[in-house]
Image (tube, grey):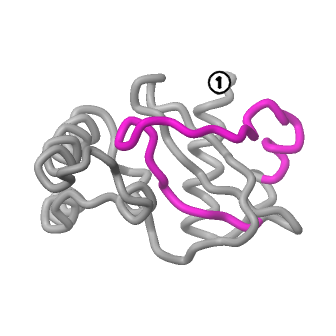
């Protein structure tokens, strides 16, 4: 039997949780690997929100860092936002294209060069593009 690395296990457990609502595997991985829970802020869109999860009495913002091999990051938060973030299934070259488009949109839409909290939370690239990619 092949042993998965921690990031693969996290991705599998998160996918299972998002589909089934079963938090047991995800909770187990986080409890056994407390180093994956970090208070981390990075540059959007390199670091972007996937979703917020509530596991037992703890809430986490699940983010992904593209420049670190699409590493998943679990950051403690006080309450869960129900709005979805960037889909977990968006990865590889398509994720890189999305990030490049986000960067271009941000550069042209923010005259002061600052990214608003709303953009950091949800992303702003074409929703139509994400819908089209989900059908491929």
Q: Is residue 42 left or right of residue 77?
A: left
Q: Nearer the viewer, residue 86 or 123?
A: 123
| Residue 119 seen from this side | yes
Q: Which residue is depicted at the point 61% across and 40% down?
A: 73
Q: Which residue is depicted at the point 72% across and 38% down?
A: 38
Q: Is residue 62 left or right of residue 125?
A: right
Q: Nearer the viewer, residue 7 or 66?
A: 66
Q: Where residue 53 sits in the image (x, y, percent)?
A: 67, 64
Q: Is residue 48 left or right of residue 26?
A: left
Residue 103 lies in quadrant: top left
Image quarter where the C terminus lies is: bottom left
Q: How many marks?
A: 1
| Residue 136 seen from this side | no
Q: Is residue 50 left or right of residue 108?
A: right
Residue 101 sits above or below residue 96 on the image: below
Secondary structure beneath disc 1? loop
Q: Where residue 5 sits in the image (x, y, percent)?
A: 65, 24
User: Magenta segment, which residues?
Assistant: 27-54
- Let me know if residue 30 is in the magenta part: yes
Residue, far front? 112
Neighbour tally class for label 1: few under 14, some 14-19, many 20 plus, Cα within 10 Å: few
Residue 130 lies in quadrant: bottom left
**Residue with the mark numbered 1:** 5
Residue 5 sits above or below residue 86 on the image: above
Q: Where residue 108 sits in the image (x, y, percent)?
A: 11, 49
Q: Which residue is depicted at the point 81% across and 59% down?
A: 24
Q: Which residue is depicted at the point 44% across and 60% down?
A: 117
Q: Where residue 75 sits in the image (x, y, percent)?
A: 68, 48
- Let me know if residue 57 is in the magenta part: no
Residue 35 lies in quadrant: top right
Image quarter where the N terminus lies is: top right
């Amino acid at each position: 039997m092949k042993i998965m690395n921690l990031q693969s296990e996290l991705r599998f457990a998160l996918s299972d949780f998002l589909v089934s609502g079963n938090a047991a595997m995800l909770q187990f991985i986080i409890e056994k690997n407390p180093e994956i829970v970090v208070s981390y802020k990075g540059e959007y869109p390199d670091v972007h929100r996937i979703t917020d999860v509530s596991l037992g009495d703890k809430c986490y913002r699940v983010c992904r860092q593209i420049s670190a091999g699409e590493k998943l990051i679990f950051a403690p938060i006080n309450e869960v936002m129900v709005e979805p973030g960037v889909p977990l299934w968006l990865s590889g070259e398509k994720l890189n294209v999305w990030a490049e488009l986000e960067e271009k949109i941000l550069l042209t839409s923010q005259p002061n060069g600052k990214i608003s909290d709303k953009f950091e939370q949800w992303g702003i690239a074409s929703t139509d593009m994400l819908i089209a990619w989900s059908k491929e």
